[in-house]
Structures are given as structure tokens and as C-alpha cells.
Image: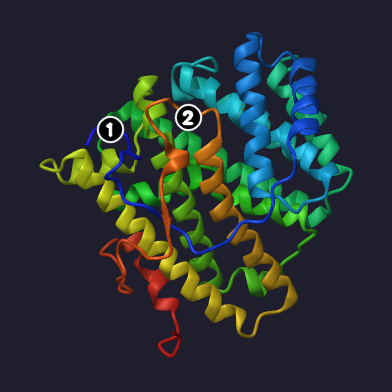
Amino acid sequence: MTADAYAPDAPPIFCPIQPLPYPDPGEFIAATAAWVSRFGLAEDPGYLHRSVLTGVAMTLCFYPDAPPSRLQDLCNYSAWAFILDDMVENGRLGKRTCDVVPALSAFVRSTANPAARLLGNHPLDAAFASMISDVHRWASPVHRQRFTASFREWMAGFIWERSLQELRQPIDLNTYLTLRLTSAGAAQAIAMGEMCHDLELSAQQRDHPAVIAASEAAMTVAVLDNDRYSHLKAVREEEDSTDIFTVIRNDNPHYTFRQALHGSVALRDRCLTLYLRLRDQLLRQASPQLRTYFHILDLLIVGNIDFGATCIRYLFPDSPGKDCPRTTTPLDPSTEPPPIPSIAWWWDQVDPASP
């Protein structure tokens, strides 16, 4: 097997969750392209086109049943976020972590006060402030607070990830799984889903250990899927980044890429199996709000798979991710926790009487 995570002998994608119909992207693409162009976020037409298609595709796959007006604001934001991610990766915001932190911190402040404009006339800052102002027109105070907190967590993840890269120290699997949740913006994906659905989950529900475990398990599935569909892009573009395959091979130097792939898919499938058990356990006596919350998580899991399989950002002629078979049977059917301290506690939240 080559470094292609979707080679013919690669494991199929386990996902028993069914997607909703996705909205037509045409009008969203046109409006998002106009918005990105207005702020001069992408000078190269080809890059602008790819960034817009990526932002729109992710938003429509993640939040297919959101109101169209809200979807448009989040399409703009998603395109902006991919451009930011690229600028961090290619060093346009600074070569060292200490060069990048001021900009990322300025964006955090802008989530609460878009008029702050701590970066002056920087196109990223102007566009972000405009988008936040648009979102504030329809988001509740609770949603604004959740967005700000989750955005702050994402920026902290960026900084943590870049710092470890600069230190050139291998990352163990236990650390990586926690790091990846933050640096991928997992909490923000959930917060944006809550905004779309006008969901204000109570602290009692949100902070229940089983709900936290289910949420983290669901988003771990998503970030491991992201590692899989973005792997070839990282290899082709020689990105200085770490993914689950690198981490597994660091821990197991004798492993081939094929063995690392199977190990990552087995772990991912075990996490998804746990999520489904916790979800079904909690839904038996769930409030309407908690049912909506798990609806959001379900759509993020399956929408992320469809996004990675079809998005122009990750497709290569010799990497047919869109053709990878899907299955309702996990590669690893184990219901026992893996020996990974940062996530093993999730399995403690399963009711022994639960199927």
C-alpha cells in the first residue's frame, strides 16, 4: 500500500448514520466568492475558487438543515477559516509561533467585539469583523458566548500544535488525540451547529459526563476522518504537520503505513461505536434540546465524511476517496476502552445495562 489512505485494500468507512439531503451550492458559492473578493482575501483566482468551494462544501455538509441566511454567513466564515489555516501553515502570518500569536489573539477579541480591529486594515481582520457583525444580528447572547469560547479553544489548539512542531518533539497518541480536538476546531463545529438550530443547551445537560464523553468521541471520529482524507494533500504539498498515521508510526517504528492506517481506522471505529452507545443511552430519556444536540453531532459525523470524499481541497486523481466503500460494521468491534488515558474515561460513562 502506498501513502494513499483510500487505496483499494484500505478499510471501508464505518458509518451507520444517514445524511440529510444537501442544499444546492450554486447561490452560496456565488455569494461567498463575492464576499471573499470584497475583502481581498485571495488574489489568485484559482486559490479563491478552491477556498470558496471548500468553505461552502463544509458548511452545507455539516449543517444541511440550517436556515439559508445563516448558512450564507457560515459559508463566508468557513472560507475565511480555511484561508486563515493556509496562512498559518505557509507562514504568511509569521514563521514562528510567537509571530502568529498576536494575530490569533486579535481574532479572539473580535469574536466578542468586532469593532476592536486590533490588526488595523489587515484583510483577514476586516473580513472577520464583518462576518462576526453579521452573525451577531441573529445569534443569541448564549450563542455568541459559545462561539467565542470555542473559537478561543481553536486558536489555543493552533498555538499548541505549532509550538510542538517547532520543538521537533514526537507527539504520543495520548497527547495527540487531545491536541487534535482543539487544533481542528471541534468545539466550534458544535457551537456553530447550535447557532444554526437555535439550541441553548443547559449547563446541567452540557456538563453531564456522559454528554461530554459522547461529544468528544463524536468529534474524535471527525478529526480522525479528517486526518485520513487530508493525508495525501499534506504529503503532496510537503506540509510540516503531524497526523494520526505519523503518531502511530512514531509509537511503533516497525509499522508500515498500511498497519498505521488499520490501527487508526480501528481506533476511529471503536470511538464511533462508543458514541452510538452513549447517544442511544442518553436519548432514552432525553429532552427535546438534548435530542437536537445529538442530531447536530450525527450530522457533523456523516457530513464530515461526505465533505472529505467530495471536496476539491482533498481530491487527487489517484486518491479516489469518494469511491471508498462504506459499511455498517466496525473494523474493531471491541466495546472495551483502549489503553489511552485521555479518552479511556469515556467508556466509564456507558451504563452496564445499555445494549
Furthest-left residue in view?
A: 254
Closest to the observer: 259 or 216? 259
Q: Quadrant of the C terminus?
A: bottom left
Above/below status of 202 relative to 322: below
Closest to the observer: 326 or 333? 326
- Distance from label 1 to label 2 (Cα)? 14 Å
Mark 2 highlights which residue? 315
For the rendered model, the colour scheme is rainbow
The amino acid type, in three-letter code, at marker 2 is Leu
The amino acid type, in three-letter code, at marker 1 is Ala
> Where in the figure is residue 136, as x and y percent of width and height?
84, 43
Query: Taking the image as drawn, is residue 176 in sight?
Result: yes
Residue at 78 percent of width and 25 percent of height:
30
Mark 1 highlights which residue? 3
> Where in the figure is residue 208, as x and y percent of width and height?
57, 74
Q: Earlier in the sequence, mark 1 or mark 2?
A: 1
| Quarter-of-image position of residue 130 | top right
Q: Is 232 on the left or on the right of 299, as rendered?
A: left
Secondary element at image label 1 = loop
Above/below status of 208 relative to 7: below
Furthest-bottom residue in view?
A: 353
Give residue 190's mark: none
Above/below status of 230 relative to 351: above
> Where in the figure is residue 71, as x and y percent of width and height?
77, 42
